[in-house]
Image (cartoon, helix red, strand yellow):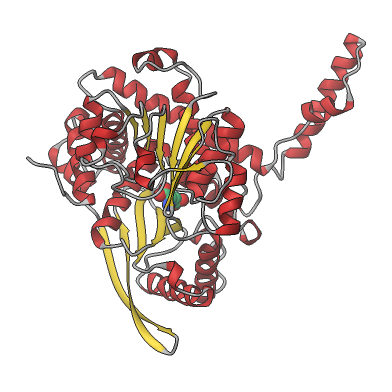
Amino acid sequence: MSIKNVSFFKSVERNFDKAAHFTGLPKGLLEQIKACNAVYQMHFPVRINGEYQVIEAYRVQHSHHRMPTKGGIRYSMSVDQDEVMALAALMTYKCALVDVPFGGAKGGVKIDPKRYTDYQLERITRRYTTELVHRNFIGPGIDVPAPDYGTSSREMAWIYDTYQTLKNGELDAAACVTGKPITLNGIRGRTEATGRGVFYGIREMLSIEEDMQKIGIAKGIAGKRIVIQGLGNVGSYTGLICQNEGDARIIAVAEYEGAIYNEHGLDMAALIQHRKDTGTIMTFSGGKPLENRQVALELDCDILIPAALENQITSENAPRIKAKIIVEAANGPVTADANDYLVKKGVIIVPDMYINAGGVTVSYFEWLKNLSHVRFGRMEKRFEHNAFEKLVNAVEKYTGKTIDAREKLILTKGADEIDLVNSGLEETMITAYHTIRDTWKANPKIEDMRTAGFVSAIGKVGSDYMNLGIFP
Ligand code: GLU
């Protein structure tokens, strides 16, 4: 069957089918796992500059095998039912893979946020939330949105406030949405979580010598030449953290307005600041402009990180891709046909459902924090500090040596919320990487990492259904 021009959702289904037969689950159960459980399409009016505009929007709950369902809300002109269904399905497999106990969902509002004022965006967001509340499509135990392409903590704050207004007195209202500002019941580390998770995943993968030898690159992330497409939240933090904590070299960055290159590595912090100040990367003095944004994807590099939107690497440009590893920081950036072509060529594609799962992982921590009504670390930080201090004092006493004051401070620090969040995220990304790797190794017929990820995820969702007794 030709797989060119298939829809995004069909492409996710196709990846599912490729993996399904490795799971040994019955056909009916596989069909249930694959299907989208609930699709809510809405149209609502919002008054913009004195005139009514009808806004098209969606919320899709792909799987109710675990509740609540979970997934971001995107604001983009590319939003349609197919896209939201595909992204909701990916959320199900993503959550299963990293053991986040939610079903998958996604929301979309078909607007170009750049064409609205902040006030207008607030009105659209509040109205969308009201629609969700009225149809019972949002709530701490029902469906919990989060940021995605075109939205941020600001929109989440509006969603939370609208929900709280309509559900006055609901004790756990803060858990109705994640990715909120820290001052509004958010959690430290959520903003950078997806990028940080991408870093932990890449670092883990590159630390396995045996696997790196097979594709002819040296072990370790330090010094690796990386190209990033997209300087939104995910691309920015991925670049910053890979550079600062992994010593990787970001040799090129592509954005909407074009692409820039520097073989010695772009200073990511300065570049991000420059774009904030001037609105473009093209005038950044630390790099030279490339002829267009597309050629950045085709540069010779170790790791290519598409961190923008879906369908960026297609059968058209795949033959010109030179990267040895493609890391899908965005959702669905490599089309199914491009995937097959590149895998045959020996390129490793680290799938979206694993590598960008850091966002939803820390969303899960935020949800737990909201339900427990207490900041992580509040109870134990001082206790830990005191215990470490006793230990350090004992070491000094019995060795007769003095530990200097600065070092003592580092050694005796109790864990803060950010330390615990990052530690939980690191553990999640490393464990999930080995789950996929072990699944792949256990079955040599599996062709790529994506299929291995699907096999593991489908197995987990399937076993939930079995345990529920729906498919005994
Ligand atoms: N939008 C993000 C994703 O695609 C985060 C979802 C969430 O935190 O619920 O994974």
Q: On the image, which quarter does residue 56 sit in?
A: bottom left
| Identity of the residue furthest to the left in this view | 1
Residue most extreme to the bottom? 50
Depicted 243 relative to depicted 46: above or below:
above
Q: Which sits in the foreground, 378 or 245? A: 245
The quarter of the picture where residue 148 lies is: bottom left
In which quadrant of the rendered view does residue 181 lie? bottom right
Task: Give the image location of residue 281, x and y in percent.
Answer: 51, 50
Q: Nearer the viewer, residue 299 or 432?
A: 299
The residue lying toward the viewer, choosing from 469 and 106, is 106
> Front-most of 219 and 371?
219
Residue 452, horizontal then vertical, whole percent: 29, 29
In the picture, the quarter occupied by the C terminus is top left
For the N terminus, give its image quadrant: top left
* Rendered location of residue 8, percent (x, y): 23, 50
In the image, is 358 to the left or to the right of 353?
right
Instruction: Answer whether residue 472 is visible to the viewer in this image.
Output: no
Q: Position of residue 464 (x, y in %)?
A: 31, 40
Residue at 51% in and 65% down? 155
Q: Is residue 418 in view?
A: yes
Residue shown at the point (16%, 49%) measured from the top left: 6
What residue is drawn where x is 82% and y is 25%? 407
Figure check: 239 above or below 432: below
* Total numbered labels placed on residues in the image: 0
Q: Is residue 202 above or below residue 353?
A: above
Residue depicted at 43% across the width and 72% down the height: 115
